[in-house]
Amino acid sequence: MPYTVDFKNVSTDGLESSPVAETLAGLRANESRYFKNKYDHDFTVSPASEVPEVVERVSRILKDERDIVIASPPLEATSFDVDGLRMAYVFYESGLSINVMYSIEDGGKRAVGFKLSEGMEIPEELASSFKFARQKSKLAGVIRGSYFVIKGEY
């Protein structure tokens, strides 16, 4: 069942099995606040088992583009269209958040973003290929992030 993420009252609902549940909840709330403030979009997530097509799409893009397979189990996922972009998010038990931004129009922006919750190590499958920049967030503490541009068509 979809859950609207409240960025004013941060909750670990759905993320309890993560060793960094509090900071992962803050990261999820940070994303919710961004989409509400920028696009007036309510950020909703579902248990990953209820939206396997979202998890499979993100996994396929990672595998096809960079031969990346995420070891951690997915906890939650979402997919939505906003302002000409098709967005997909997967939140993993390890504290990793992956988003796919895919412009609906040909020639638009298309990228995969990685964000690490405060307190988690860089996953082995990403450590050798990506450098992570730091960003401070009132909701999530210190977020580390990286990205790559999608070259294929999905």
Image (spheres, rainbow, N blue to C red):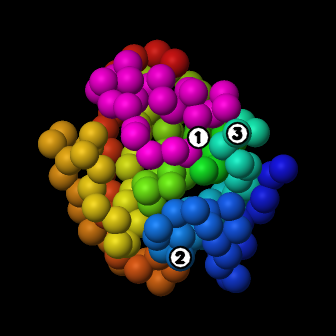
- First in residue order: circle 1 vs circle 2: 2
Magenta segment range?
A: 52-74
* Residue marked by disc 3: 49
In this rendering, position of residue 68 left or right of residue 96: left
| Residue drawn where x is 51% and y is 51% of the image | 92
Residue 85 at x, y = what percent? 59, 38
Tell me, yes or no, whether the two marked residues, 2 and 3, touch with CB atoms within 8 Å.
no
* Number of callouts: 3
Residue 71 at x, y = what percent? 40, 40
Above or below, 32 against 62 in this view is below
Label 1 amino acid?
Ala
Q: CA distance from mark 2 to mark 3?
A: 21 Å
Judge by depth and name the residue closer to the eye, 141 or 125.
125
Which corner quadrant of the image does residue 44 belong to?
bottom right
| Residue drawn where x is 33% and y is 57% of the image | 145
Which corner quadrant of the image does residue 40 belong to?
bottom right
Judge by depth and name the residue closer to the eye, 142 or 17.
17
Question: Where residue 6 is drawn, which disc sits there?
Answer: none
- First in residue order: circle 2 vs circle 3: 2
Residue 86 at x, y = what percent? 61, 36
Tell me, yes or no, whether the two marked residues, 1 and 2, touch with CB atoms within 8 Å.
no
* Residue marked by disc 2: 22
Q: Secondary structure at mark 1?
A: strand
Tell us which disc is closer to us: 1 or 3.
3
* Residue marked by disc 1: 88
Which corner quadrant of the image does residue 135 belong to?
bottom left
Q: Is residue 41 visible?
A: no
Q: Is residue 64 visible?
A: yes
Label 2 amino acid?
Glu
